[in-house]
Amino acid sequence: MANDVRTVEWTGDALRLIDQTLLPGRLEFIDVRDVATLIDAIARLAVRGAPALGVTGAFGVAVALSEAAREGWDDTRTDKAIARIRHARPTAVNLAWGVDRVLPLVPKGLEAVVAEAQAILDEDVRANHSIGAHGTAWLRQRTGRRLRVLTHCNAGALATAGWGTALGVVRQLHAENLVEMVYVDETRPLLQGSRLTAWELDQAGIPYRVQVDGAAASTIMRGLVDVAIIGADRIAANGDTANKIGSLAVALACADRNVPFMVAAPWSTIDLRTPSGDTIQIEERDPDEILTWNGAPVAPKGAQAFNPAFDVTPARLVTALATETGVLEVSAGTTPSATQPPHPPKP
Ligand code: MRU
């Protein structure tokens, strides 16, 4: 990202987040010092994207401990505050994962929690570079041309601690002069594609075109796309993948046209305790995100809306899952459950 700005960072006494709701117009930061501000930032997607939420959850525990010390909270009140952070959004497993990973450090105090959260942040950046390298190597072996990539939502530096997952692959492909064009789905209703992914590609000098979500299947079926690369919010043990609503339609079109559908995600997004996508909780958001535009109504007064934030792509449609340890060919039968994770999850 430009000038190496950090999506999430600990300043010493606050959790500093880029306010992603203001991009691409303004690059501004929020310094979070209390749990209510943090939960609000997560809920309105000032911070978003599964790995970024994982790091935020971990530092969120530090925010809760600092506030507890300031306000004289007892353990029960502190535990409740941490639980609220853990459940602030339901679909991305990384949020709960990040909180859970630092919880054993709570008895040791704030410094120990901050150190573990920082380790998660650093690991995420390293994992994303590995994902980019593995995903690129897999694609390089299968194609002799510069690629026309399609991506959906934002799985870039802004959605992670840095570099990005799906955009990590795109950045590495670009470094090897292997990107011809990136089709960026605008990603209704909150426009993570046009506002955030396009911003990141712009900064990186990678050629892109923004298209409406409804164009994606047609762009693929017209033969204009060599690979779709997306991120993930939760991947079940069998490879079923929850990601931003609209990802499934991309996968279906890819399957029909025999275009590889690549999911790029770290192991922290793989939830081996969820056997399949059927039990992944899909967040439903405020109908007004669909029924209004800049505060003005875009549907008849009283209209109802259905606003699921994510969908689940069945494993059979996922050609490749690029992780920091290598690429799993999921539709060909290599599931996460049959593969050794780098850090076995604790029961
Ligand atoms: O609602 P959001 O913006 O948090 O949704 C984000 C996505 O769906 C991303 O694709 C996913 O979290 C992967 S981010 C590397």
Image: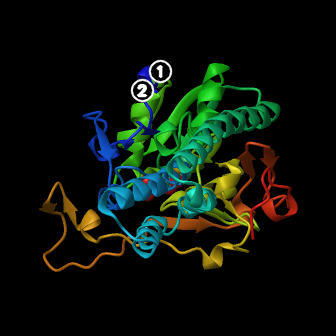
Label 1 crowd (10 A; few <14 / some 14-19 / many >=20): few
Residue 83, position in %: x, y?
47, 71
Query: Which residue is identified by label 2?
Result: 202
Query: How many numbered discs sit on the rendered protein?
Result: 2
Whole-number angstrom distance, CA of label 2 to CA of label 1: 5 Å
Tell me: 343 left or right of 178.
right
Along the line of sight, the residue nearer the viewer: 268 or 16: 16
The residue that appears at 82% across and 64% down in the rendered structure is 337
- Element carrying mark 1: loop
Q: Is residue 217 visible?
A: no
Along the line of sight, the residue nearer the viewer: 295 or 68: 68
- Quarter of image, res 11: top left
Query: Which residue is identified by label 1?
Result: 205
Tell me: 54 left or right of 7.
right
Q: Is residue 346 visible?
A: yes
- Quarter of image, res 256: bottom right
- Element carrying mark 2: helix
Tell me: 53 left or right of 142.
left
The residue that appears at 28% across and 36% down in the rendered structure is 28
Q: Is residue 314 above or below residue 262?
A: below
Q: Is residue 13 above or below residue 46?
A: above
- Quarter of image, res 165: top right
Query: Do tag 2 and tag 1 residues touch (Cβ < 8 Å)?
Result: yes
Residue 221, position in %: x, y?
58, 50
Please name the amino acid that badge 2 sits on: Asp
The residue that appears at 75% across and 71% down in the rendered structure is 347
Label 2 crowd (10 A; few <14 / some 14-19 / many >=20): some
Please name the amino acid that badge 1 sits on: Gly
